């Protein structure tokens, strides 16, 4: 159960944003129900994550692969639950999704994916990326892809840290939003 109650989606300040979230995401997810305690933060978050997920040129399979890896590294089950179906739609196999917890022990990822995963691990675990790790991913991606990958890894580390600090879980009951 979340550490504080989810925000009331029917509050007048939140209502237009709730409608936008439902339009863009299909429903009011637990994450956004918590973020609505601060509509300015929720709106900025929505804009940034929409840019990362829907307006970048980075391959969706790479994006979802690092999101899933971050969920494993940070112990964020809600993030993994939300993104596993997306990862499969973006082209990862079930074996690849399942193998992400210990990807180095698997023979499931090509050289590009391995370079991306090593970069993700380094950014998430050590913050400071060693030169050989950076050079390996740089050899696989162009400048735009590298910027978008780096922003994606940073963004989803933010997501998992928020989710886990607030103990947001998909089974938590949400307040009803007026239609």
Image: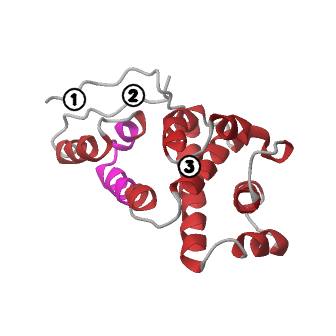
Residue at screen point 37% across, 31% down: 6
Residues at discs 3 and 1 in contact (Cβ within 8 Å)? no
Residues at discs 2 and 1 in contact (Cβ within 8 Å)? no
Residues at discs 3 and 2 in contact (Cβ within 8 Å)? no
Please tell me how crowded label 1 is: few (under 14), some (14-19), or many (20+) other residues with Cα within 10 Å: some
Measured from the top left, where is residue 119 in percent x and y? 73, 62
Measured from the top left, where is residue 76 in percent x and y? 61, 37
Residue at screen point 46% across, 21% down: 171
Distance (Cα) linking label 3 and label 1 = 29 Å
Q: Earlier in the sequence, mark 2 or mark 1?
A: 2
Q: Earlier in the sequence, mark 3 or mark 1?
A: 3
Distance (Cα) linking label 3 and label 2 = 29 Å
Please tell me how crowded label 2 is: few (under 14), some (14-19), or many (20+) other residues with Cα within 10 Å: some
Q: Which residue is mark 1?
A: 177
Residue 96, by quadrant, is top right
Dot 3: what SS?
helix
Task: Tell whether position 6 is magenta.
Answer: no
Which of the two residues, 70 or 164, is positioned nearer the viewer here?
Answer: 70
Q: Which residues are magenta?
A: 32-47
As drawn, the label of residue 95 is none
Q: Is residue 83 left or right of residue 66?
A: left
Judged by its main secondary structure, the magenta piece is helix
Q: Residue furthest bottom?
A: 143
Residue at screen point 19% across, 34% down: 10
Q: Earlier in the sequence, mark 3 or mark 2?
A: 2
Residue 131, by quadrant, is bottom right
As drawn, the label of residue 64 is 3
Q: Which residue is mark 2?
A: 5
Query: How are the residues colored?
Result: secondary structure
Dot 1: what SS?
loop
Quadrant location, the C terminus: top left
């Amino acid at each position: 159960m979340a550490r504080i109650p989810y925000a009331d989606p029917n509050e007048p300040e939140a209502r237009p944003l709730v409608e936008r979230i439902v339009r863009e995401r299909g429903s009011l997810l637990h994450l956004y129900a918590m973020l609505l305690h601060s509509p300015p933060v929720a709106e900025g978050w929505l804009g940034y994550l929409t840019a990362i997920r829907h307006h970048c040129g980075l391959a969706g399979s790479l994006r979802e692969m690092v999101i899933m890896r971050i969920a494993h590294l940070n112990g964020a089950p809600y993030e993994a639950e939300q993104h596993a179906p997306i990862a499969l739609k973006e082209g990862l196999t079930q074996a690849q999704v399942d193998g992400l917890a210990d990807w180095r022990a698997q023979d499931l990822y090509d050289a590009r994916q391995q370079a991306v995963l090593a970069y993700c691990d380094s950014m998430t675990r050590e913050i400071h990326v060693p030169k050989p790790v950076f050079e390996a991913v740089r050899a696989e991606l162009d400048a735009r892809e590298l910027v978008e990958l780096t922003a994606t890894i940073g963004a989803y580390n933010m997501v998992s840290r928020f989710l886990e600090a607030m103990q947001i879980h998909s089974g938590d009951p949400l307040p009803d939003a007026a239609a």
